[in-house]
Structures are given as C-alpha cells and as structure tokens.
Amino acid sequence: MRERLDGLAFRDMIISAAASVEDRKDEINELNVFPVPDGDTGTNMSLTLNAAASELAGKTPKTLSAAADSAAGAMLRGARGNSGVILSLLFRGMAKALKDKKTADAGEFAAALSEGVSAAYKAVMKPSEGTILTVSRLAAAAAAEAAAKEADIDAVLARAIEAGKAALENTVNQNPVLKKAGVIDAGGMGYIIALEAAAAALRGEVRAYSAASKKGESVFAKFETEEIEFGYCTEFIVRRDCDKSPDLLRSFLGSIGDSVVVLEDEEVIKVHVHSNKPGDVLTEALTFGALLSVKIENMREQHSSKLVEAEPQGNEESRPEPEITEASKSFGIVAVCAGEGMTSLFRELGADNIVSGGQTMNPATEDILRQINRTPAETVFVLPNNKNIIMAAEQCVQLTPKKVIVVRTATIQQGVAAMLAVEPDAPVEQIEKAMAEAASRVTSISVTYAARDSVFDGAEIKEGDFLVLQDSRLLCTERLLEPAIKRIASLLREKSCEIISVFYGEDVSEQQAKALAKELEAALPGAELSLVNGGQPVYYYMISAE
C-alpha cells in the first residue's frame, strides 16, 4: 500500500510510461483511421513522453514538485502534433496542482489528474468527445471518487485505469469518424498505455530508460566533437518502386559513410547510415522509389550538447536561458514547410526562418520556438501550415519574451496566401487580419495516396489509391490519376477560380506537372495559372485556388 507519492516515484512513472508507449507506438499509429499517411499519433506521443523521460533519467528529484515541473517543461518543449500537445497539457496541469509539494497523498494525486484535464480542455479551442480528452476526464473523475474512500495511491490509479479503459472502448461510439472505421481513439489508447505503465512502476516494475545518463565521467567526454568523422545520422524508409537491388544502395552508402544498415522486404527498404552529405544519401535513395519517412540528425551538434549536459551543474533544476536574437525590426515570420522548393518559396515571400515539417513530420514545440527566438523581430508571425501543428505552435506564445502571433493556417496553400497578403509597412494588427483573411479565401486541393485499405465517408479506399483532398476533406478517390485530375478541374470550374497555383512534389516530374497544368488551363481558359516545383513529400500536387 502506497499512501504518499514522491519525486523519485514520479520519475519512474514517467520513464516507464515513455518506454511502454515507445514499444507500442506502431499499434497506436495503426488506429489513425484516415488513410492518408498520417498514422503518427503513437509516434508523437512517444516523442513527447521521451522528452520528459530524457530530462528525468539519471536525476534524483528531491521533491514531487521538482519532478513534475521537469517533466511538464520538457514535454511542453518536446510536444509534437495535437496528441503530443494535449498530453503535455495534461502534465502541465498536474505540475501546477503539485507545485511546492514534497510528496502527495491519494487525494492530492487525484486532484492533480483533474487539474491536468482542466488545463487540456481550456487549451483546446473546440474540444471533441470520444478522444484522449474524454478518456483522461473520466479516468480523473474515477480517481477522485476512489481517493475520497481510500488512501492507497495504487488503488486510486487502478480505478482511474479501469474507468479510462471503459471510456476508451466507448470512443468508437462517440466520434463519427471512429464509428465508421470501427476503431477506438488512438490518443486515448496512448494515454491508457501510459497510465498502465505508470501503475506498474509504482508496483516496482520500472522500465529502464535506454538513454539514461550514468553518474561519473560521461562517455561523450572521452572524445572531441571534431573526431566524429561522419556528422549526420540519416534514417529513412523508401518504397521499392523499381527492380534495383538494395545491394546497390548498400554499396553506395558504404562508399560515402559508415554504420550502414539496410533492411528490406518486398515493399520497402529501411536504411540507417552515418555520412557527411545526407542530401546525396536521399538523392540516391530516390532512384529506388518514393521516400516514406526521413530523419536526419546532426551528431556533432548532439555531441556538443551532451558535453554541456555532462558538465557539473550547481543547481539540478537550473536551465540555460534560450538564445534570443535582438529585435531589429517590428515583425518577422516563421513558416513550417517541407521540400526544397517550398522552403525557397517561403523565403522568397519574406519568411525569416523555416521549420522543417508537415504531414507525418510534425515538429516539436521546441523546434518552432528555436526559430521564433532566432527571428530578429519584436513580433513573430508563425504559419503552422498543417492542422496537426497549430497547437504545438500556439504553445510557444508563453515560452518566449517575443510577441508570437500564430496564424492558424491548416495547409501550405493557406500559408502561401497569407505570405502574399503581408504589407511590410502596415501595423502588426492589420497584417494579422490580412493574413488570416487571405488564408480563409483559399481553396486548398491536395493529391496524395492511401496508405492502407479503409472506408471513409462511405467511400471504399484501397491502398495505393490516389486521394484528392479539398481543405483536408476527402473529395474523391481514384485508382488512376487521370480521372482524379478531371475531378479537380471540374471543381475549380464550378468555383469559377481565377488564380491557380500548382505545387508539384518530389515524386512528380516536370513533364507530368506540365501535363496537369495543361489540362487545368483547358478547363479554365480565363484563369491565371502558375506551376511551381515544391519538392514536397507525401503530396504529389498541392493546388491553391481563388
């Protein structure tokens, strides 16, 4: 029986939760019911929890308040995607309730769970039931009811999990999208997995954190950063779109780097390599097929950071202040996008800094914050350009002395329109209004592919189908691209669109893009059409129409 929760126990709960969600993230990802390759809820929750686990690993927090504050702060900065941000909000509310407490009893712990739920609900503009919010709310309510009757924290947490599981099973009946797909909510499942692992930690079943630091001399201090021969760790998965042998890729990677691991099956090739030119690595990978996922890390920067972390600290809870670039102008702009062409376009339109990210590649709040702080302006506009990045961007408002205005652009097309509406000499308030209005006028059409078989809005979708999305809603699905293009042309003609911009992606040749542009021009002879090589992943075409 445990009647008090302390900092060490809370640390172990976080570390175990992170390890368990990491183990089962693919299972959580598979519950993302929309068949666009957006199955990243488990990944986002795992990365968010791991930020807290990394912060706490190897530490011995003296109080529960210190442990909760460390976890909440790390999760806030490391939050990715809506699921990760909501998870960080749940822990931020808990940390607020546990502030200045050395330990907590069952009632205080239950109250902290409820405070976390309140923080999450307040931060979400339009809370939806049948999600992680519902699951966490009913779990917290059950914990409060149990804590009123008994002092055993283990029993209180067990009751919360029991109620949370029942709520999770019911999400399929609360959310229309889940009901059509016949699945439970992915975020809610991730939350229950985290709670179960936390409960196991309280029983002494603590999961080890693989990256936990050890006391004594850091292994990173045994060599200099300059001794790292190959500076970039590149991991990716490429679809096998041709008959080229993976052995050719192995040979090429071995000639320009080391730590080469190439795994393959009939559909994909998964690669890990250390090199100095990740661009060359990915260029060669594209000769085998479309890139499905990419992660590039600067190992020299990571090593330098580890050396700083390994230095003795006078205060365990102290953090270095973030570097803030001094303001030299009234406003600046940070945009989120992926693809060399899209990056160049946003810079040409006036963006000061770019955050690499987008669909299936949600940047952390800290990634966005870093670029905000590097922008030499008093006010910084942020264009998330993806509905799953908006919440992460909004968390930056309270993390920097700069004034941050998040323009809630849900698509790249809206972001481009917002950039075009900027009047450099106008007041900040007027610019914000103009950007929001411009974004709202755009019809965003995107062409991508189905990652798996599914049924959505009554339409049967097969893996590999072309999907046409209109403002993030499914417009049509086709086995061949030609009828999909005809459907797009028909829609634009119905809307009498006069200005059309077509951004073609990394898997589309210039010749293919020009063919599509020709068909659109034929359907809308009076429209002004521009064709841009965006180089974006995931989407074959992104079309902006007004």
Image (spheres, rainbow, N blue to C red):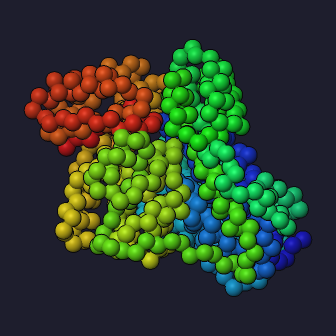
Q: Residue furthest left?
A: 526
Q: Nearer the viewer, residue 375 or 60?
A: 375
Q: Quadrant of the C terminus?
A: top left
The residue sitting at the bottom extreme is 100
Q: Is residue 160 above or below residue 403?
A: above
Outermost residue toward the top? 243
Q: Point out residue 97 in the picture as x, y percentages from the top left corner.
A: 64, 79
Q: Is residue 41 above or below residue 181?
A: below
- Name which residue lies at 77% across and 83% down: 102
Query: Could you tell me residue 289's position as x and y percent?
Result: 52, 24
Q: Determine the residue positioned at 87% across, 62% down.
A: 203
Residue 115 position by quadrant: bottom right
470, 343: nearer the viewer: 343
222 vs 502: above or below:
below
526 left or right of 258?
A: left
**What residue is shown at x 79% (from left), y 58% (from top)?**
222
Please give left or right for residue 427 compared with residue 148 in the image: left
Name the residue at 75% across, 53% down: 19
User: Residue 134's spot in the image, x, y percent?
Assistant: 58, 59
Whether residue 223 appears in this view of the structure is yes
